[in-house]
Structures are given as C-alpha cells and as structure tokens.
Amino acid sequence: MLTGKTALITGGGQGVGQGIALALAAKGANIVVTGRTLTKCEASAELIRERDVKALPLRCDVKSESDLQDSIDKTIAEFGGLDILVNNAQEVARGTLMQVTDIQFLGSWESGPLATFRLMKMAYPHLKESKGTVINLCSSVMKRWDVGTYGVYAAVKASIQQLTRAAANEWGKDGIRVNAIMPHAKSPALAGWMKANPVEAEHFQASIPLGYVGECEEDIGAFVAMMCSDDARYLSGQTIALDGGQVFTG
C-alpha cells in the first residue's frame, strides 16, 4: 500500500500518465498531476479523488525550468513532502533523420532527457528525506530491430535510460530507488499512430506474444504501483519492458 504517500506525475492528464496516477491513487497515494493543458489535469484529478485520496492538478510545460520548479514547490506546500516522482511527459518527433528538424529534435530533448534530469535534481532533497522512488518512462523503440523513422525518439529515450542508471547508482546510498519502464499502452498517442498506420499497426500487435496492447491503468499503472511499494524495495537501476513479451532486452 502507498497510503499517505505523495506522487508527482508529469503528463498525467491522459494516457499512460493518467493510468499510473489512477493506479497509485487506488493504492492510497495522494497525486499531483501536471500537464500542459490544465483542463485535462483537472479531469484526471476528479477521477483520482474518486479513489478517496487528494489530488492537485497543475499546469506545467516540462520544457520550462520555472514550471518544473513551481510544480515541486506547490507539491511540497500542499502535501509537505514527495515520495514518488514519475517522469512521463514527452514530445515525440517521428520521421527519418533527414525529415526531423532541429526544432523538433530540441523539443524531444527538452521535454525528455533534460526535463527528467532537471526534475529529478529538483526532487532529490525531498526524495532523500522520504527515501522515495523515481519512475522514468523509456520505450522499447530503443530495442527495435528497425529504428528507421524512430531514431530521434530512440535517442532521447536511451538518454533517459542512462540518466535512470546514473541516478540509481548515485542516490542508492540515500535510500532513493530509480527505475524505468518501456510500456506498450493504449494511450491517445499510440491509438493515433495505429489509426494512421494500419498495416504497420497490425504487424505491431501481432508481434506481441500476449496478443494485445496494455491498458494504461490495469497493466502499466498497476505494475508501477508495485514498483513504488515496499514489495519492490530491492529493485533499482533497472529498465523493464511492459510490452506483453515483445522486446528482447538481451
């Protein structure tokens, strides 16, 4: 159980972030849900409160250092501490290397590795006090056999994986656990991609041994909740595929 703990989740207004927020709330955690669109965060907060916990919706553009710090400050002011940080928000630039622009690349970098780097450091003193947990979102695209058109996305997610490993090694002495997941989930982004690329989507789903794309709350969120609990107290520095058995991590 996570009763009385506080979790901050970026990109929690929909999709995987919302699923993780709901699953953590079901285990008793109070939730700070952030995103670029406040109305989406407020809608998530209403669903979270139905789990009999507190929720704080905040507008936050993860590419803004001041927005990130404001989210930390308001979390501490509202709940008095921080136990769980989930770095989920990410802009995705898809296309060949020749198609992706510098601006798109920078957006992927600033919203992914740089935001993760910044927010982990901002949260560090509070996580040290609570002996808390960080969950970073990576992607099995890092392990694709054909990374064509996914090169930039794979690059930024691989960077987050290395930041995860570094933080786990450096902060383990402080009792902070840091892990990452590579999920396949029925998010709006994946649903949009599958609709736009039906042939590739059919092959993609057929390549999942369990035969389906995971549910945001029941499959991805529930596992994250376990990772944040004392049942996983010896788990740190790992990147785990939540993809129905598709990827071989080697």
Image: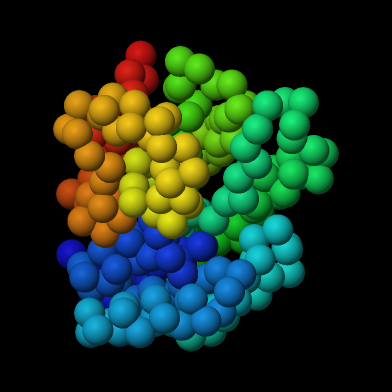
Q: Is residue 220 above or below residue 37?
A: above
**Residue 48: in sight, yes or no?**
yes
x, y percentage for residue 176? Answer: 42, 49
Count of numbered tags: 0
- Between 204 and 71, the one lying in front of the other is 204
Q: Quadrant of residue 28?
A: bottom left
Does residue 176 appear left or right of residue 205 in this picture? right
- Left-right relation of 91 to 105: left
Q: Above or below — where is 102 with respect to 84?
A: above
Considering only vertical position in the picture, is 160 above or below 98? below
Q: Which percent across, then down, holds residue 214?
A: 26, 46
Q: Position of residue 173 (x, y in %)?
A: 44, 43
What residue do we see at 81% from left, 45% from top?
103
Vertical arrangement, residue 138 with respect to residue 25, above or below: above
> At 18% across and 49% down in the image, what residue appears?
231
Q: Residue at x 74, y 35 (%)?
A: 100
Query: Between residues 53 and 246, which one lies in front from this camera angle?
Result: 246
Colouring convention used in this rendered image of the protein: rainbow
Q: Nearer the viewer, residue 1 or 124?
A: 1
Query: Which quarter of the rendered picture does the C terminus lie within?
Result: top left
Give the residue drawn at x 48%, y 76%. Answer: 41
In the rendered image, which quarter contains the N terminus?
bottom left
Query: Residue 249 at x, y = what percent?
Result: 36, 20
Q: Is residue 159 visible?
A: no
In the rendered image, which quarter is residue 241 located in?
A: top left
